[in-house]
Every structure is written in structure tokens, then in C-alpha cells.
Image: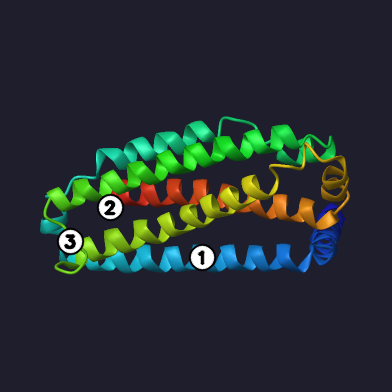
Amino acid sequence: MSSRQDNIDTSSRILSGFKEIEKWHPHKMLSHLMLLGSFLVLIFLLITFTVEAVNYRDFLATIKLPKFFIIATIVILISGLFKNEILTSYGNDDIETIRKIFFGKFLFGTVFLLFQFVGWLELVFQGLTFKNDVIGTFLFLITGYHMLHVLTCLIYITIFLYRSKDVHIDPVSKLLYFTAPYERVKLEIFGTFWNFIGVSWIFLFIWLVFLM
């Protein structure tokens, strides 16, 4: 009886979960599907790289994981220590705090990109190139794929900071911004995208550590 009740409760939770998803804005649903697709592409690249690494294990043993990849990971972990108050600030009509949070994320993202680029230089100094060897091709392709996501996020932040610069000054603009449901949806999408960047990099970094 207890097992049957547990199955009923589980089914109810799953059903309620699907009903909650059905309430999502189409753009929010699309963004989640895109991130899922991006994660699957990353998994495919890593698995292919792992298979190829078996054939080049002697060469791979001579390659050291860039120190700046480690520093970039620390930057990601530090950025995750700061609580995300974007939606709370939106509920409080606090555009100043939202802009500060976005600016902080822009700084963290820029520093992270810089360290990744320097990590690339470390790989080049070790003799790896994008065209001349399989290991170099995959390392640059995988990390470059992640960098593209970070760059996309930074572009969005730049656009947001530019468009919201007058919201806290003009009462009408502020009213329109905080009464538009889609503005909250965009913040939710950004938050999910930003979390994806952090989680996917840590996942990628751990995979490379064990592989290299």
C-alpha cells in the first residue's frame, strides 16, 4: 500500500512539474532547449576528444593543463559565492541594484575570458595548434565553444546596461520597465544562461583534469 502511495505521489509531482513547464513563456522554453542542446554538443565533443586521446595518450602525457584554466575556474567559483538578487531586486523595483549585479557579472565574465585566452597561449607555447594536431584542435574547439557562450552573455549585459541607463532617472521608463512581464522573463533567462556557463565550465574543467 505504501509503495503504491509513493508511486501516486511521484506521478503527481511529475504531472505538476509538466504543468508548471507549460506555464513558461515560449522564449524561456526555447532558451532551456537551446542550453540543453549546447550541453549535448559539449558532451559529444568531450567524448570524441576522450576517444581520440586514447590514440595520442603518449603525446597528451607531455601536455600540461594551463595554469590560467585553473585560475579561470577559481574566478567562476568566486562569482558563484555572490547571491543572485536580480529577481528580488526586480520585485522591489530596484534598477540600481540590478545594474550593479549585471556590471559585476560583466567584470567576472571579462576576467574569465581573459584567463581563458591566456590559457590558450599556454597551450600554444607547449606546441599545440588548432590545425596541426588532433589534441590541439579539440582543446581549442571545446574551450572556444564555451568562450562563445561567455561572450554572448557579455554582449547581452552590455546591451542591458546601455538600455537601462535612464530607467532609474525617468519615472515613466521605470514604470514601464517594472510593469512589463517580459522584462522579468528576460532576467530569468539570463540567470539560467549565466548558471549554465559556470556549471558547464566546471564540468569541462574536471573532465580535462582527469583526462590530462
Q: Amino acid at mark 1?
A: Ser
Judged from the image, the secondary structure of the residue bearing numbered disc 2 is helix
**CA–CA distance between discs 3 and 2?**
19 Å
Left or right placement of residue 29 versus residue 12 in this view: left
Q: Report if the CB atoms under discs 3 and 2 are less than 8 Å apart.
A: no
Percent x, y for residue 40? 49, 67
Residue underneath mark 1: 38
Residue underneath mark 2: 211
Q: Amino acid at mark 2?
A: Leu
| Mark 1 closeness class: few <14, some 14–19, many ≥20 residues within 10 Å | some
Nearest to the observer: residue 169 or residue 42: 169
Residue underneath mark 3: 129
Nearest to the observer: residue 112 or residue 17: 112
Q: Quadrant of the N terminus?
A: bottom right
Percent x, y for residue 100? 64, 33
Nearest to the observer: residue 79 or residue 118: 118
Q: Report if the CB atoms under discs 3 and 1 are less than 8 Å apart.
A: no
Is residue 2 visible in this depiction of the protein?
A: yes
Q: Is residue 152 above or below residue 55?
A: above
Q: Is residue 113 above or below residue 16?
A: above
Left or right placement of residue 132 versus residue 207 in this view: left
Q: Amino acid at mark 3?
A: Thr
Question: Going 43% across and 63% down the picture, which residue do you hit?
Answer: 42
Is residue 53 visible in this depiction of the protein?
A: no
Q: Which circle, 3 or 2, is nearer the viewer?
A: 3
**CA–CA distance between discs 2 and 1?**
21 Å
Q: Which circle, 2 or 1, is nearer the viewer?
A: 1
Percent x, y for residue 6? 82, 54
Q: Earlier in the sequence, mark 2 or mark 1?
A: 1
Left or right placement of residue 29 versus residue 198 in this view: right
Question: Going 21% across and 61% down the picture, which residue do you hit?
Answer: 136
